[in-house]
Amino acid sequence: MGATLAGWLQALALVGALALCYRPLGDHIAKLLTTAKHLRAERGLYRLIGVDGDADQRWPVYLRSVLAFSAVSVLFLYGLIRLQTHLLLSLGVPEMAPHQAWNTAISFTTNTNWQSYSGESAMGHLVQMAGLAVQNFVSAAVGIAVVAALIRGFTRNRTDRVGNFWVDLTRIVLRLLLPVSIVFALVLVAGGVVQNFHGFHDLATLGGGTQSIPGGPVASQEVIKQLGTNGGGFFNANSAHPFENPTGFTNVLEIFLLLVISFSLPRTFGRMVGDHRQGYAIVSVMALFWVASATLITFAESHHGGAALQAAGGAMEGKEQRFGVAASSLFAASTTLTSTGAVNSFHDSYTPFGGGLTVFDMMLGEIAPGGTGSGLYGMLILAIVAVFVAGLMVGRTPEYLGKKLGGREMKFASLYILTTPTLVLIGTGVAMALPGERAGMLNSGAHGFSEVLYAFTSASNNNGSAFAGITVSTPWYDTALGLAMVLGRFLPMVFVLALAGSLARQQPVPATPGTLPTHKPLFVGLLSGVVLIVVGLTYFPALALGPIAEGLH
């Protein structure tokens, strides 16, 4: 069986698995977000932190809870990293520089997991498990909690309450992320992924010397990574490393884990608003962009000109022969359309148009299906814009799910959309204007510009992957990319929660013959057009200077 055919068969199996999980997983998430019953363990945690599990919060209080929890997480993780040489299981790693510790603490707290270091030489087991792995759970849970608050804004009337952040966070971790990660850690171990707690193992003699390969709980870390977070992993080779991704089966499974929660959340949305057709419309747009991205990247990597590429059957530089072009392209599309950052090939080695598509995927706001929670609330913001545009076309007040979209709501939506492009374009422009930072590019010209553009796009959209051709472990880059990550994560959350509060206060209006049906193919097409025009064209000049210019050269 050829690599291309195998890749497409894997894609079909992946689509089938995601379709099977859409309803049960989406319904499970809706139930845990709406039930009034608390588990015994949850009640114990509420008493420990002094939270009333039955009390709802106003949106400003919900927002302050999100920001306070994240700020404490940053401080704790920063301290843990800086002090790790004095703690247990440090493995003798050297002390991390302050600017890199800041970048790492921000990165994992914001669900970005950008790594400007090699995990096996910079992090001991305690920091990996008690610091980074914990944030892989809770930062993903924060995203789902925020979208839950936004959905409640649509479902609640004449109230200023959007839920309880501490209850949402606890339930998402205990009832969703932990059970899924435990089950699939066992599946990955059965598939050949390493799971151990040895400090150093596998001494390999190379040219008369020895090379120590650090071990660790790789299987558990891999599940956490794919479920919505981690970029580099233990070995900083990501899912190209045979310890983390040994076979074609584990490769498909990891792509499945990248996507399954985010693709199931539209079902949660449909169930919570009382109309499953709304969820089908949203997931259709997500699936449309995901399929288009995977197809175009595979085509670009398989049909690029050049004798060497044609002889190899595609652009194989930077790709694992275990997976080939099709499976690598499928992984690349899936990871850049989610806020995961895991890769099984190096995007810096992709063809100009193939690499450019990975950048464009992130520029869309990672909404197809996007990060855990953040993908859905990003798509709902764009759905609000689509309804508003349709209302302007026919000259009537726009309404979405019975809520009027006035000036206040559109200001929040507009600020949300403008946040990440501002961070990406200003960050890239400043980096290119500074001679010292331009020196960090491995390549010159259009490809070098693409490396910088990719770095700030990845950081601002909380993706975490990199072109791998740029030196970012400098004080300036660690600081600038850290700022991009924190602003790109929490400023949009401010606008989302403010919008949730504004919607929750409204009295619903009944549907009329003039109301735009938001569950039909017409709306799916309109929303897809808004995604491409409102979001995609924002970055066109920057793309023209980078991957497009390189591809047309």
Image (spheres, rainbow, N blue to C red):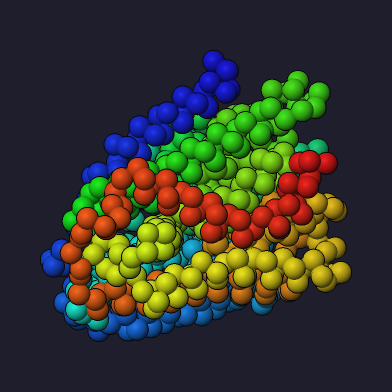
Q: Position of residue 119 (x, y in %)?
A: 61, 57
For the C terminus, the quadrant is: top right
Residue 439 lies in quadrant:
bottom right
Say if 341 sits above or below 47 in the image. Answer: above
Q: Residue at x 58, y 45 (%)?
A: 343
Looking at the image, which is closer to me, 99 or 215? 99
In the image, taking residue 11 as reference, residue 157 lies left or right, namely left
Looking at the image, which is closer to me, 165 or 104? 165
Q: Position of residue 456 (x, y in %)?
A: 65, 63
Q: Residue at x 29, y 49 (%)?
A: 519
Which residue is most to the top? Answer: 1
Q: Position of residue 342 (x, y in %)?
A: 55, 49
Q: Position of residue 251 (x, y in %)?
A: 50, 36
Q: Residue at x 18, y 56 (%)?
A: 274
Which residue is most to the left? Answer: 37
In the image, taking residue 424 as reference, residue 110 lies left or right, namely left
Say if 139 sits above or below 411 in the image. Answer: above
Q: How many marks?
A: 0
In the image, taking residue 159 as reference, residue 549 lies left or right, namely right
Confirm whether residue 68 shows in the render: yes
Residue 438 lies in quadrant:
bottom right
Looking at the image, which is closer to me, 529 or 109? 529
Q: Residue at x 31, y 45 (%)?
A: 520
For the N terminus, the quadrant is: top right
Confirm whether residue 39 shows in the render: no
